[in-house]
Image (spheres, helix red, strand yellow):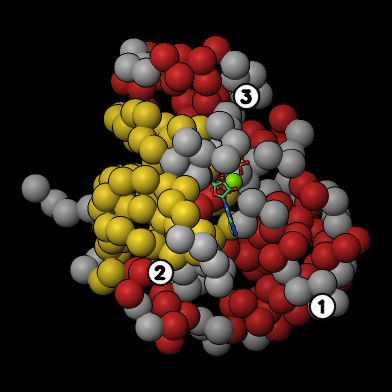
Amino acid sequence: MTRPLLEFDHVEVSFDGTPVVHDVSLPVMEGEVVCIVGESGSGKSTLVRAAMGQLGRHGCVTRGDIWYGGESLPDLPARRMRQLCGTDLALVFQDCLASLAPIRRIGDQVFEGMNAHRKVSRKECDRLALEMFERLGLDDPERVLASYPFELSGGMGQRVGIAIALLGEPRVLFADEPTSALDVIAQAQVVRLLARVNRELGTTIVLVTHNMAVVEAIADHVLVLRGGTVEEFGPAQQVLQTPAAAYTRELIAATPRLAAGCV
Ligand SMILES: Nc1ncnc2c1ncn2[C@@H]1O[C@H](COP(=O)(O)OP(=O)(O)OP(=O)(O)O)[C@@H](O)[C@H]1O
Ligand SMILES: [Mg+2]
């Protein structure tokens, strides 16, 4: 049997010594889309941040491991993690605007991000960024490129974050609620683009969402978290059609529909 590209192996994550994620195991196969769902505070962001080494000073993986192609991500030296970030692993933060440098224009930040991994001229970088912004449904791409983060709405910032991550063409994309600040049309555009990137580039996607309609549209597997523990994990169709946990049934019942025909 092929090994997962990425594997959370009995992971416990703690902040200041207090565990918030308990014994979570999650295999992610190359080229698939795995969705992580669950109520607010269930540990979704913590899991993806743990994989990216982005837990901050107070958080760490206290048990288990997170494997990526034979390397233990929590044990990696910072230098190796920096090498992987952007090209192998990329994260779209839940709050994209806050993750951008506040006093630098978007275009400069996109250019800096791209140049960290491949040599590209400013002109070519702007062209690729404008094309990506358009695909993500941003209305005035030139203005966005020339803007400072504070001049963008939350939904615009979310799409800029997605664009920056996708322009690095990472092997694994972690996206933490990338559609939560978007209207239904923009949500559908983003989900459609992620599905296309997955299909055409083979990008493995780990997507955090509250929205079971997004799961239905895009996921191969789904992990349901509650209170930092695994409530349920399985193929998306199985979990959606015959959920084993009462909590999953509640989540499905509470979900609004995605704009029709989105993928
Ligand atoms: N930096 C931190 N310091 C201390 N506790 C934290 C920190 N970040 C997260 N936590 C705690 O970890 C738990 C899981 O939080 P997390 O942000 O992973 O939830 P989530 O599932 O992403 O929620 P949401 O859907 O609201 O984004 C919560 O109890 C939260 O208070
Ligand atoms: Mg979160």
In what element is the residue under mark 3?
loop
Residue labelled with disc 3 = 258
Q: Is residue 134 visible?
A: no
| Front disc: 1 or 3 | 1
Q: Earlier in the sequence, mark 1 or mark 2?
A: 2
Question: As rendered, which of 242 and 139 lies closer to the eye?
Answer: 242
CA gap, disc 3 and disc 2: 30 Å
Q: Earlier in the sequence, mark 3 or mark 2?
A: 2
Residue labelled with disc 1 = 104
In what element is the residue under mark 2?
loop
Residue 207, compared with residue 227, is above or below; it is below
Question: As rendered, which of 73 and 62 lies closer to the eye?
Answer: 62
Farthest left residue? 1
Question: As rendered, which of 87 and 61 lies closer to the eye?
Answer: 61
User: Residue 152: x and y, percent?
Assistant: 86, 57
Q: Earlier in the sequence, mark 1 or mark 3?
A: 1
**Disc 2 residue crowd, few under 14, some 14–19, many 20+, Cα 10 Å:** some
Amino acid carrying mark 2 in the image:
Asp
CA gap, disc 1 and disc 3: 34 Å
Mark 1 and ligand 1: say if the CB distance to the nearest ligand atom is below 8 Å.
no
Farthest front residue? 17
